[in-house]
């Protein structure tokens, strides 16, 4: 991808980021549950501890996004964790380097901010994503089980 850039997203990118989040939800089978609006997303990006994003842009067109925030304390080390909430590349641009470029940027951001690690979740059935994460040197946290309780 010759003309691929990774940019830090800002409020002007909210409509595109929101579209990517909805596309990701559809891909994951959660489309009906995805109710995020642009105004809600903009609000998250303006909080004291904001949601942030990087975007993969190819020839001026956004083709992927990764949203993230900081968990302010990893108690054993006293350092922050950069938590990747969503990572998505449009299907027709996958396996061409955009995802790796976004994760490289996230790793650089984490280093610049003194973070202990990057952390994210992946659906177990998403074998392509699992292979991608393995290729970029990530490891599944085998010792930890993620629990969740939906709020009704």
Image (tube, rainbow, N blue to C red):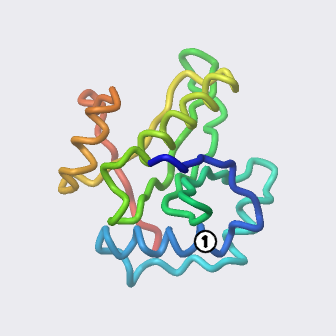
Residue furthest front as drawn: 2
Crowding at label 1, few (<14), some or many (≥20) Cα neighbours within 10 Å?
some
Element under disc 1: helix
**Residue 8, horizontal then vertical, whole percent:** 69, 48
- Residue at 66% across / 21% down in the picture? 114
**Residue 126, horizontal then vertical, whole percent:** 22, 55
| Quarter assignment of residue 69 | top right
Whether residue 114 sits left or right of residue 49 in the image: it is: left
Judge by depth and name the residue closer to the eye, 116 or 4. Answer: 4
Whether residue 108 sits left or right of residue 13 in the image: it is: left
**Residue 75, horizontal then vertical, whole percent:** 57, 22
* Residue occupied by mark 1: 16
- The C terminus: image quadrant: bottom left
Relative to 129, does residue 106 appear above or below in the rendering? above
Number of numbered discs: 1
Whether residue 131 sits left or right of residue 116 in the image: it is: left
Relative to 95, does residue 62 appear above or below in the rendering? below
**Residue 3, horizontal then vertical, whole percent:** 54, 50
- Residue at 54% across / 30% down in the picture? 107
- Residue at 61% across / 38% down in the picture? 71
Residue furthest bottom as drawn: 32
Whether residue 66 sits left or right of residue 131 in the image: it is: right
Residue furthest top as drawn: 77
């Amino acid at each position: 991808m010759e003309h691929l850039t990774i940019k830090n997203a800002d409020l002007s990118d909210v409509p595109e980021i929101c579209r990517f989040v909805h596309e990701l939800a559809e891909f994951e089978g959660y489309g009906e549950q995805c109710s995020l609006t642009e105004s809600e997303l903009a609000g998250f990006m303006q909080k004291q501890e904001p949601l942030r994003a990087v975007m993969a842009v190819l020839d001026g067109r956004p083709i992927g996004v990764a949203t993230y925030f900081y968990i302010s304390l990893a108690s054993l080390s006293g350092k922050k964790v950069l938590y990747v909430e969503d990572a998505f590349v449009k299907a027709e641009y996958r396996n061409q380097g955009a995802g790796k470029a976004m994760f490289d940027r996230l790793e650089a951001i984490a280093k610049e901010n003194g973070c202990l690690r990057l952390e994210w979740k992946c659906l177990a059935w998403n074998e392509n994503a699992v292979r991608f994460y393995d290729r970029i040197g990530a490891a599944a946290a085998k010792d930890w089980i993620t629990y969740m309780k939906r709020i009704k």
